[in-house]
Image (tube, grey):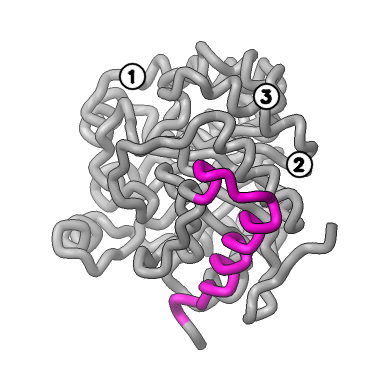
Amino acid sequence: MKTITDQYQRPIISLRITLTNLCNLNCIYCHHDGMESSKDEMSADEIYKICEIAKNIGVKKIRLSGGEPLVRKDIVEIIEKIATLDFKDISLTTNGVLLEKYSEDLKKAGLNRVNVSLDTLKPDVYQFITKKDYLEKVKKGIVKAVDAGLDPVKINMVLMKGINEDEVEEMFEFSKKYGIVLQLIELVESENCDDDKFSKEYHYSLESIEDELASRADHVKTRKFMQSRKKYYIDGGEIEVVKPMDNTDFCKNCTRLRITPDGKIKPCLLRNDNLVDLISHIRRGDNDSQLKERFLIGINNRKPYNME
């Protein structure tokens, strides 16, 4: 199936599905991936149908996220269903609290890889960030994911000034020990009132860290279709740097559509004013051709949030 492009010639390669807005943590920087709160979650069969239509328009990769996707009791069933569609890649982003419990079942169900959000290895800092005391549980879950054969396992570390910016080396050593990729993520500077106050207080630029990584790296790779982000290979380990999403480089290289937890197509991470209803059309029994048309409307709604 030929990949569909939008009107800016950006290919639609991946689909990110938010399975739920529920979470078992309360992280201080969480902005719910730009989603509005929803109580009307999709069923496993509805998620399968969405993925089936996505496959038919050329989508190659599926990422499942939340909230916290592992709080859904049917998470293994969801992945089993999606895996029958033979995507190139099925991945999941989790906070890791339930990863020890589910890793083996997720791998058997067809999950390829997992990203774990973990910003610190210090118990007091972890509790400050998440409002919970689950650090050891998360670390065990990460090791279990590696042992289960999920590959690669990545750690997503959001750097925050005065909180954890001094922990990069410690996290890198932990990652190298288990063959994990470390992703350093720059805190998004928001224009929303409360978020803006938080981001101004805790924003930490990754420029100096990137300069240091470049000086130490044995090899550097630029990922063209991932916002030209760089991967640094150092002493047998791997660090990837993720800059804020609200920039022209991110937008011009965006290849992803999103699905909200209540079944709407979200053409742009940074906008909520151009959502396209999909789930009501599935529930009323629209055929595949009609559902494909809903996807095409969503793709046609894609416009770079930041233009050069």
- Residue 209's label in the rendered image is none
Residue 111 percent coordinates (x, y):
67, 29
Q: Residue at x 56, y 68 (%)?
A: 297
- Give the residue number, with chain letter if any, for mark 1: 134
Residue 94 percent coordinates (x, y):
47, 32
- Give the residue number, with chain letter if any, for mark 2: 87
- Vertical arrangement, residue 5 with respect to residue 90, above or below: below
Distance Cα–Cα, label 3 vs label 1: 28 Å
What amino acid type is highlighted by mark number 3? Glu
> Given this view, does label 2 or label 1 mark the residue nearer the observer?
2
User: For the residue carrying disc 1, how many other residues have a C-alpha within 10 Å: few (<14), some (14-19), or many (20+)?
Assistant: some
- Residue 80's label in the rendered image is 3
SS class, disc 2 = loop
- Vertical arrangement, residue 153 with respect to residue 1, above or below: above
Give the extent of the magenta segment.
281-306
* Front residue (pair 213, 193): 193
Tell me, yes or no, whether the two marked residues, 2 and 3, touch with CB atoms within 8 Å.
no
What amino acid type is highlighted by mark number 2? Phe
Q: Residue at x 73, y 49 (%)?
A: 55
Distance Cα–Cα, label 2 vs label 1: 33 Å
Distance Cα–Cα, label 2 vs label 3: 12 Å
Q: Residue at x 63, y 28 (%)?
A: 79
- Of mark 3 and mark 1, the one earlier in the sequence is 3
**Residue 122 placement: quadrant:** top left
Residue 218 percent coordinates (x, y):
72, 52
- Vertical arrangement, residue 10 with respect to residue 67, above or below: below
Q: Main secondary structure of the magenta part?
A: helix
Q: Is residue 57 visible?
A: yes
Does 291 appear in magenta?
yes
